[in-house]
Amino acid sequence: MAVITTTRRTERFRPTTPATCKYWLAGRCNRNPCQFSHSLPTSPSNVYYNANSTYKHSKMASSSAKKPINCAPKAFKKPENCALRAVEYRPEAMSVEKPTKCEQKAVADVEDVATVAKACVDKSRSICKDWMTDNCVHGDLCQNLHSWFYGDGFSTLAKLHEHNKAITGIALPAGSNKLISGSTDGTVRAWDCNTGRCVHMIHLNSPVTSLISEGPWIFAGVKNAVKAWNIQTGADVTLDGPKGQVLSLKVGNDTLLAGAEDGVIYAWRCSFESPFKMVATLSGHSKPVVSLAIGSHKMLYSGSMDHTIKVWDLDTLQCTMTLNGHTDVVTSLICWDNFLLSASSDRTVNVWVCTEEGTLEVTYTHTHEIAVLGMYGMTDTEAKPILFCSCKDNSVRMYELPTFLERGRLFTRQEVRSFEIGPGGLFFTGDGTGLLNVWKWLEEPKVPT
């Protein structure tokens, strides 16, 4: 008796390539070789299905196609000398073979895998909130990150946690092996750079809202004053004058500048007769001054809650222009090369350039999906400028300049409020919980002077 072998129709559409590895989609597959595919499947191609067929896409094309603006549609002309000119166009007369259910399912499976893959890529840039509290039950199958950072070229070295409120300033004074941090818990702490232990603490009985160092001096902004210490001579000075909390500090042209809650910038000059002498009050902002930056040609830039940036001449201490490029608080300012970069709660970073007329204009705007709280800059191991943007979603985005190509992200439990560059490829971040993180580039980068 002859044996007749039959093949069911559905077997013709059985996938010939293995299923896509779900661990690979999440970026966590460590099997080599892996029995599953490490690539996205493509749409099936056969005589029964055409991805560009009228049946598949005719409705979508008719609804999504856009007509050129201010352009009249061209009329279709019938060919004059053609045997088909008498044939009328009737869509119902056109025959397109309808895919079978098996074919439709195969296409749907491909589209579902692509959708999952895209979701995994997007979600892989977010940290798992359950993992942060040791409550994630998905393990390696979790689509979110189980790490405090992603990106290549750097790693975390240590976590210093003695402050119990936000760290608002980090400094490395010249000639010292101590790391200094200030916090809204009202303390300034000194950390041994070799052991990572807190070796000294000063209680100020007022929240520290800004902290910097210049040479052997440490400056801390508190309510109605700036506290100053000299680590070489032991001098302890209180600079009175500001009204309200001192929110920003900068030193330029031998002048200490303090942006205060009353919208005024207070200026002290150093001299041999007196360590600090108030020489001017720079008025112009209508709301608190939250960011300061020193640029070339002895220029000072100030950002305020009044949404403006003001430019000051450090020789005359006079305002030379006002920049209006943001619609919310100007949270941070830095000078890079010949450009001024400004960040705002309006979710943008503006790049300003000087024009031939001597004014500043925005040459590029980078938009985030969340408010930007601060910006910090350094270079990587290849001397490429890297911009760190602290965002309100408890992350720090790292971008290459000038392309704004994202290099990685750092994650914290609360927003990063302070940043400092150290020697040997070290950098430090302080967040809203009082945690001070020590990071390191895998190879020593060059720090711009």
Image (spheres, helix red, strand yellow):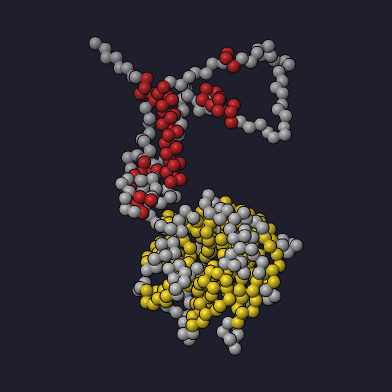
On the image, the x and y values in percent for residue 400 come to 54, 58
Which residue lies at the image location 46% right of the left edge and 45% below the top edge?
122
Viewer-proximal residue among 49 and 268: 268
Which residue lies at the image location 37% right of the left edge and 31% below the top edge?
16
**Horizontally, is 177 left or right of 314 in the view?**
left
Q: Is residue 46 above or below residue 22?
A: above
How many discs mark residues in the rendered view?
Answer: 0
On the image, the x and y values in percent for residue 43 come to 46, 31
Q: Residue furthest bottom?
A: 273
On the image, the x and y values in percent for residue 421 come to 48, 69
Q: Is residue 390 above or below residue 162?
A: above
- From where the camera sits, is residue 295 visible? no
**Horizontally, is 279 left or right of 381 in the view?**
right
Q: Residue furthest left?
A: 1
Q: Is residue 350 above or below residue 37?
A: below
Quarter of the image where one finds residue 162: bottom left
Viewer-proximal residue among 88 and 287: 287
**Quadrant the C terminus occupies:** bottom right
Q: Residue furthest right?
A: 357
